[in-house]
């Protein structure tokens, strides 16, 4: 019940395309869903986060879509650029739960 | 404002040795979490400290231990090193415990190689 399942494991997209990374959770008590971005040689950094009271949140070219009934959330990157190439982690937590991480998606944006 | 500082950045040890890694959180942050990252294994949670108390512990053997000091700085120790302990060890700090949905700020990690 504590797992967060992330897919795909890796993704290659042409520049300008819209990569989509999906995550699914099981614990309905989770109420915070962040995405972290990690570049090689660096630690992860918070990219965008959403709470279940909204179905979508946009920050620049990054959008989280949230489906509470399906217990799924996804990250979309509009007009993707080679600089977006990184590993992306989804996570979930709640007030009485530590942050549970997805396995990560290695994204490559081809020029 | 200085970020999370981890030392050393790189180190090489041999099997059977022990290692101590250090983490200085962002000033004012009271929570420190440690993660092990290996290729293809994502972020494996080691432990979390808040105000010098261990709040959560991941599924790692007792060879992995940690502590937090009164100034919020944290150390983790791995004894009797094994080849499989080779990994990037990441420290993250936050104002409040991660379960309260605060943002985690990660350091650049300590890359441990065990020969």
Image (cartoon, helix red, strand yellow):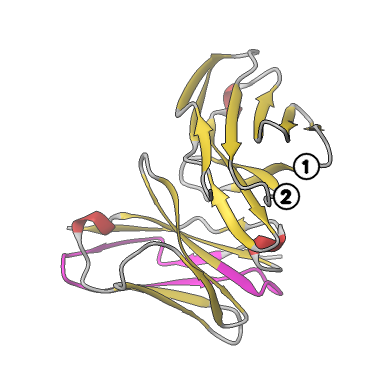
The answer for which chain carries disc 2 is: A
* Residue, disc 2: A31
Give the SS element for disc 1: loop
Q: Residue B97: x percent and y percent?
A: 66, 67
The answer to whether residue A68 shows anywhere in this view is yes
On the image, the x and y values in percent for residue B105 come to: 63, 58
Contact, mark 1 vs mark 2 (Cβ under 8 Å): yes
Q: Is residue B99 located in the magenta-colored stretch of the structure? A: no
Q: CA distance from mark 1 to mark 2?
A: 6 Å
Identify the residue at image location x=24%, y=55%: B84
Which quadrant, please, contains the C terminus of chain A? Answer: top right
Q: Residue at x 65, y 61 (%)?
A: B99
- Mark 1 or mark 2: whose residue is earlier in sequence: 2
What is the x, y in percent for residue A18?
65, 17
Q: Is residue A7 left or right of residue A37?
A: left
The chain identifier of the residue carrying mark 1 reads A
Say which element carries label 2: loop
Task: Examine the rendered structure and indicate whether residue A66 appears above or below residue A82.
Answer: below
Q: Which residue is mark 1?
A: A52
Per the rendered image, the range of residues in magenta is B5-32
- The reply, left or right, for residue A107 in relation to residue A59 is left
**Closer to the camera in the image, A78 or B50:** B50
Query: Which residue does the image show at 49% across and 65% down from the upper left?
Result: B6
Which residue is drawn at the image coordinates 65% and 33% (left, top)? A72
């Amino acid at each position: 019940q504590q797992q967060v399942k992330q897919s795909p494991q890796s993704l290659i997209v042409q520049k300008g395309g819209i990569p989509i990374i999906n995550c699914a959770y099981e614990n309905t008590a989770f109420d915070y869903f962040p995405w972290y971005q990690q570049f090689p040689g660096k630690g992860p950094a918070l990219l965008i986060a959403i709470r279940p009271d909204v179905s979508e949140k946009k920050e620049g070219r990054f959008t989280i879509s949230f489906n509470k009934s399906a217990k799924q959330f996804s990250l979309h990157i509009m007009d993707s650029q080679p600089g977006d190439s990184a590993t992306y982690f989804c996570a979930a937590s709640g007030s009485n739960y530590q942050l549970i991480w997805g396995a990560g998606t290695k994204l490559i944006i081809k020029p | 404002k200085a970020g999370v500082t981890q030392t050393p950045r790189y180190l090489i040890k041999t099997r059977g040795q022990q290692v101590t890694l250090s983490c200085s959180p962002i000033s004012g942050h009271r929570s420190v979490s440690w993660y092990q990252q290996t290729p293809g294994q994502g972020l494996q949670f080691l432990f979390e400290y808040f105000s010098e108390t261990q709040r959560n512990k991941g599924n790692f053997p007792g060879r992995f231990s940690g502590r937090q000091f009164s100034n919020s700085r944290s150390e983790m120790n791995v004894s009797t090193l094994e080849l499989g302990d080779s990994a990037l060890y990441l420290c993250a700090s936050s104002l409040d415990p991660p379960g309260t949905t605060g943002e985690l700020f990660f350091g650049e990690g300590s890359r441990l190689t065990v020969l």
